[in-house]
Image (tube, rainbow, N blue to C red):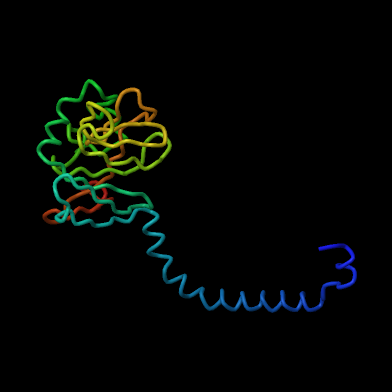
């Protein structure tokens, strides 16, 4: 638009001010009407953000399958490991940074075992790489990442690798194993994420 056009057709400032004032008043009215509705949602959102427990039914997760749920705004994995997966875990200790889960902050005490779980077949972990918080890919098939790969998790951001118990490989940028959150079993395969015997009261 040329300067000549601007001078010949100046904007109607009064009309613009009136439009802006009307929009502002309308916005306040909408906000006022929405406030009670938003307030009714606040407690559950606040509870969720503070880590309120969530329940996941793992009965529908087949051997070898990985399910994801949300807890504290983070993805939490529930992996049902089959017998072959469990056998492969036992032969990998020499390749891992912390095979015995000695860094205690990464899991509850009951998950400081070779499978890092309450039940060998069900693995529960926060699905975020401990390097910079990317979401690793689940590559369960042997050789699916590279020759000799026994199956596990691979972070495409910077190349960190974890086994099927979330234990980090030596030489990975990630400094520690994946986090195992507190959890318990309610009944059967129903898992309560964020609650165990130390957090439930």
Residue 121 in the figure: left or right of residue 50: left
Can you give x and y, in whole percent of width and height, for residue 77 in the image?
27, 47
Image height of 184 relative to 172, above or below: below
Image height of 79 relative to 186, above or below: above
Can you give x and y, in whole percent of width and height, for residue 164 in the image?
22, 36
Can you give x and y, in whole percent of width and height, for residue 173 in the image?
39, 28
Depth check, front residue: 55 or 152: 152
Residue at left offset 27%, top offset 43%: 125
Residue at left offset 22%, top offset 31%: 143
Q: Quadrant of residue 187?
A: bottom left
Depth check, front residue: 2 or 166: 2
Image height of 64 relative to 73, above or below: above
Image height of 36 relative to 65, above or below: below
Q: Quadrant of residue 113?
A: top left
Residue 74 in the figure: left or right of residue 196: right
Residue at left offset 90%, top offset 72%: 8
Can you give x and y, in whole percent of width and height, for residue 175 in the image?
37, 28
Residue reaching furthest to the top: 94
Depth check, front residue: 177 or 82: 82
Q: Quadrant of the N terminus?
A: bottom right
């Amino acid at each position: 638009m040329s300067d000549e056009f601007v001078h010949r057709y100046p904007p109607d400032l009064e009309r613009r001010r009136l439009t802006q004032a009307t929009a502002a008043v309308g916005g306040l009215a909408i906000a006022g009407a929405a406030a009670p509705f938003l307030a009714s949602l606040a407690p559950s959102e606040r509870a969720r953000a503070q880590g309120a427990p969530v329940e996941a039914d793992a009965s529908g997760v087949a051997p070898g399958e990985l399910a994801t749920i949300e807890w504290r705004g983070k993805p939490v994995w529930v992996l049902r490991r089959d017998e072959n997966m469990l056998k492969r875990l036992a032969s990998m200790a020499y390749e891992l940074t912390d095979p015995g889960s000695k860094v205690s902050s990464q899991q509850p005490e009951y998950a400081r075992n070779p499978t890092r779980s309450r039940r060998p077949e069900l693995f529960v972990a926060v699905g975020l790489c401990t390097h910079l918080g990317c979401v690793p890919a689940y590559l369960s098939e042997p050789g699916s990442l590279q020759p000799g790969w026994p199956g596990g998790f691979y972070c495409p951001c910077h190349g960190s690798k974890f086994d099927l118990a979330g234990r980090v490989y030596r030489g990975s940028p990630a400094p520690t194993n994946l986090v195992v959150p507190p959890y318990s079993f309610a009944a059967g395969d129903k898992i309560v994420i964020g609650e165990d015997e130390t957090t439930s009261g």
